[in-house]
Amino acid sequence: NLDTPVGDAAKLEPADKKKIAEAIDKATGNTLTNAVNVGDLQAAVSAAKTEVKSDDGSITVTPSTNATTGAPVYDVKVATTNLENNPNGTVKTPEGEAGKQFVNASTLANVMNNISHNVTIGKDETDFNNQAGKADFAVKAGETLQFNAGKNLIVKQNGKEITFATANDVTFNNVTSNNINVPTDTADSPITITKNGISAGDKPITNVSSSLPTYTDAPRTGLVNLTNATPNNVATVGDLQKMGWVVQSDKTTGDTSKEFSNQVKNADVVKFVGTGAATVSANTTADGTNVITIDVAEAKAGLTTGNITVNDGTNPAQPAGTVSGDTTNGKAASVDDVVKAVNESGFKVAANGTTSKDPKEPSKDNIVNAGDVLNFANGQGTKANVTVDGNTTTVRIDSPLAYVNSTAPTDTSNPTNTVKFVGSDAA
């Protein structure tokens, strides 16, 4: 045994050298502490030799000897290949023997960092139901992931950035909003819809449908019928054009045998015209009321009585007077004036030139007025007869007296001064 530290050069004395030589010569090589014969060692090394080879050439071993120590050196190399990406983001498959080789770590890292899928945008306006919770779908490297803009949406792509926005022109079935503002050409005057109402922003509201029916019966045909109208509904300009009323008269100017009827709409003019004794005037009062005045000028009774004659053949009954009044054109008597004039337009009745007196008021002449009864009574030797033929009233006083040379009772000869009395017992 040599007590020499490992790695230090052994320092042998001559006696030691002798002991080593003897030990080697006598060694059997079956004990770990025994000395080994060089020949035995070489044989053992040859028997324990291990070969390293790679049938596919993926591993190569290159042996060499350390020039300093003489120890064998084995250089083991593994065949590697570089990986690449395809333009679509997938990994390019190695061809031939390269497919059996190990991958270079650097290229592997580069390939992994560049594996990708494609992203594009599109448009899809078909109707569909909400599909939240639908199963996942794996998008593999090299496949295309498409983002579509649905109804009322637009989409844009800038490389890997995708932006969605609401389209300017949209269509919805229902919209709930606290406020809706529509800008107009006038600054600070938008069209607004709020819970308080609608402001048209000083713009006209057009193309509104009418909800008002019209009359179908004459003379109101075509005029707006507001009988069953809903108070809160909006009237259109067309409705206003159909608003109106009907003016009627039982006579038509120029043809009084026909009735008159016409519709008055919007700004149509109705003119009141006075003719004859009627004067029409109009004015607006302080409170804004338009007043139309129809004035028939009042005049005292203008009736005039002529001679009213009781046809007794000799003595006409003289009128008590005439009814006179303002004869200026355009004047008309009032009803009271006419009634009074007629009632007082009587006549006096005289007997033998003497006017009879009112028995109730002896100082006044007895006057026969309208409505009074003038009674023709039978007198001594006379008989009163009153006959009416159309507009002619005849009063006849008959007498049984006859002239001497007459043939009673129908005598047309000239009378004499002699009167013959004829009785039932004439002598």
Image (cartoon, rainbow, N blue to C red):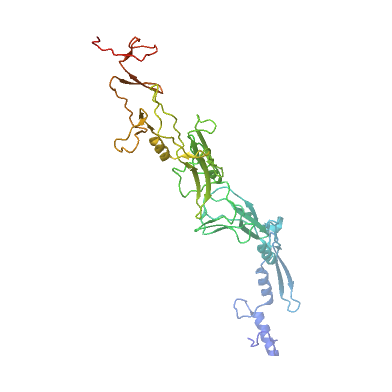
Residue 146 visible in the displayed image: no
Q: Residue, x 64% and y 52% (percent of image)? A: 122
Report the quarter where the N terminus lies. bottom right
Q: Position of residue 82 (x, y in %)?
A: 71, 62
**Total labels drawn:** 0
Measured along the vertical axis of the image, is residue 238 above or below residue 97? above
Q: Position of residue 356 (x, y in %)?
A: 33, 32
Q: Quadrant of residue 45?
A: bottom right
Q: Position of residue 420 (x, y in %)?
A: 31, 13
Which of these two is toward me, 188 or 60? 188
Left or right: 30, with 381 as reference point? right
Name the outermost residue toward the front: 417
Name the outermost residue toward the right: 67
Residue 88 visible in the displayed image: yes
Q: Residue, x 46% and y 45% (percent of image)? A: 229
Measured along the vertical axis of the image, is residue 228 above or below residue 318? below
Q: Quadrant of residue 365?
A: top left
Left or right: 120, with 280 as reference point? right
Q: Quadrant of residue 15?
A: bottom right
Left or right: 365, with 331 as reference point? left
Report the quarter where the C terminus lies. top left
Which of these two is toward me, 367 or 258? 367
Measured along the vertical axis of the image, is residue 404 above or below residue 175? above
Q: Position of residue 149 (x, y in %)?
A: 61, 53
